[in-house]
Amino acid sequence: MLPESFIQELKFRNDIEDVVSSYVNLKRGGKTLAGLCPFHSEKSPSFHVYPNTQSFYCFGCGAGGDVITFVRRMENLEYMEALRFLAQRSGLDMPDEVESDGSARLKTRILEINREAARIFHQNLSSPAGREGLNYLRSRGLSDQTIRRFGLGYSLSGSGLYKLLSAKGYTDDELIAAAVAAKSNRGTGCFDIFQGRVMFPILDLRGNVIAFGGRLTAAAGQQGWDKRKYLNTSDTPVFKKSRNLFALNFAKNSGEKGKGLILAEGYMDVIALHQAGFDNAVATLGTALTPEQSRQIAHYTKLVRLCYDSDGPGQAATARAIDLLSKAGVQVKVIQIPNAKDPDEYIKKFGPQRFKLLLEGSVNSIEYTISAIRQKYDLESDDGKMNCLNELAAMLTAIPNEISRDVYISRIAADFDTSKEALASQVNYLRKRKRRESEKKAMLDPFAVNPSGGGQKSINTMQRQNNIKYARAEDGILAALVLNPDYFKWVSRKIRPEDFVTDCGRSIAQAVYGRLEQNLSADISFLGESLDPEAISLLVRLQNDFSEQSIPREDVETYISTLLQRRTEKSQKELSEMSMEEYAQYLANITKGKAGKPLP
């Protein structure tokens, strides 16, 4: 158990405005600050920071909490890990008694294993057994400086890495959790997951080695090992491939300086770009771009130039990336690579200066999409023109800005020698139909995506909607207890957590009652370990809704009466179904005070 004085000092040293501003571009408006939410894709700011209560809340997706909650969400950390993160940020030493936390210890051990493995892989390049890896890297035109900068290496065949790390005291369970070793099917021990591969360490923004990518060499493939060309670390306690980007630790500074980021497909493309002087290149990790990666990119830049392969899969990946990045509020341009498969090949053929010209000539995402659609059809035939125009009209519905949409409607109509009015009419028809379908889906499906961008409705949301009067009474009682803890004794005599209607309200009440019964603070900082994110978000919203108004006792009495009324109403229904014997027993219980508290 952490001393509460430590958590208070931790929050004092980590002002929420300073911490959030390192991730989100905030603009002040009155007593609050607003910005684009880092937890869901949006184009209009709905994310607010409240310096007076040291909290945040997003009106789009409902995420909320204090600085500890924010760091947990942003960095994908457990509660204790978030405290360590903030302690390190502010120069505080963590109390000794929390160092035994099992989850945090495992993550620390995995990071140590990865660091040791990266060192061993790199050293292998200098050994005769690792010559295959070094030859491959040099054949790809990489200099020794680039190899050192990215910490590239080579994994040998057999179980050499496993034996070396075991000798350093790491257990089989730890090595398996780190995804550098796996159990033998014969149950005779472990073997190395990466064998005969050029190794690409993946680093987080703090410089920790969190995972690896491995590229099979020709000799290894001939000897019958895992034949997959690329093998990436599976998800571990320190790594989620859907949330990380290769080389962002190097490129993020360029993004912050306004250069934007170049998003390429693979490790070698990114390394070749960096070696050629384009130090703002990043890549996804063996998967298509994800919404989480798009939002992470949006933290560092508002401009991305896509530089994917020119083949069919590359074009499909480009279309997906345009959609996700646009939803995250990022401007997208597309680098079109002629006479080469990818940026690595183009730079080798034509040099960095020619690539720079491609960079400067990149087209915006709308122009790229129009060009891609046109290439799909035979525009010499009437059918081809008609089908192309229909697809272009559907594409134009996604342009939110009315002026931009009108410009492209005019241009396309002129290119196809058709009426602008006819094309505009089709686009408006499709927009209205899409809106009607969205509204219909939201009405028919209680779990349909929230139009505000907040994702799916939760169980708590459904419970609140079905019991709105009682849910509001819960809100009032909880806000009163958090903001006026001196009310607790008389409130707790009248109503208990089990009397609350919604699961979320009940869990908050249990946590708040538990703290106040021990004369401890019910501040959200001390509830973060026992409540889930949705409960913390609700508590923060209540705190900010009620923070500038008093909650008189008579109002709280009304909230309590309303909440207890539901229990009485439920009992009334049950009365009609009781036998005479059951009813007599019920009256006897009331007399004895066992059927629940009377209304105040």
Image (spheres, rainbow, N blue to C red):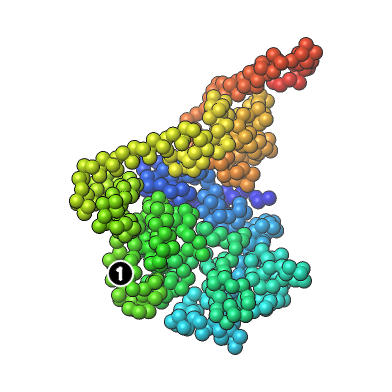
Could you tell me if residue 556 is visible in this image?
A: no
Tag 1 secondary structure: helix
Name which residue lies at 71% across and 65% down: 173
Categorize mark 1 by other alpha carbons within 10 Å: few (<14), some (14-19), many (20+). Answer: some
Q: In this view, does 400 lie to the left or right of 494?
A: left
- Residue 413 coordinates in the image, percent (x, y): 22, 49
Name which residue lies at 51% across and 41% down: 456
Q: In which quarter of the image is residue 585?
A: top right
Q: In this view, does 251 lie to the left or right of 474?
A: left
Name which residue lies at 59% across and 50% down: 7
Q: In which quarter of the image is residue 436?
A: top left
Q: Identify the residue under disc 1.
A: 358
Q: Which of 341 and 154 is in front in this view?
A: 341
Could you tell me if residue 68 is visible in this image?
A: yes
Q: In this view, does 519 lie to the left or right of 456?
A: right
Q: In which quarter of the image is residue 505?
A: top right
- Residue 257 coordinates in the image, percent (x, y): 36, 63
| Amino acid type assigned to the residue bearing label 1 in the image | Leu
Q: Which of 467 and 378 is in front in this view?
A: 378
Q: Considering the image in quadrants, where does the C terminus appear?
A: top right
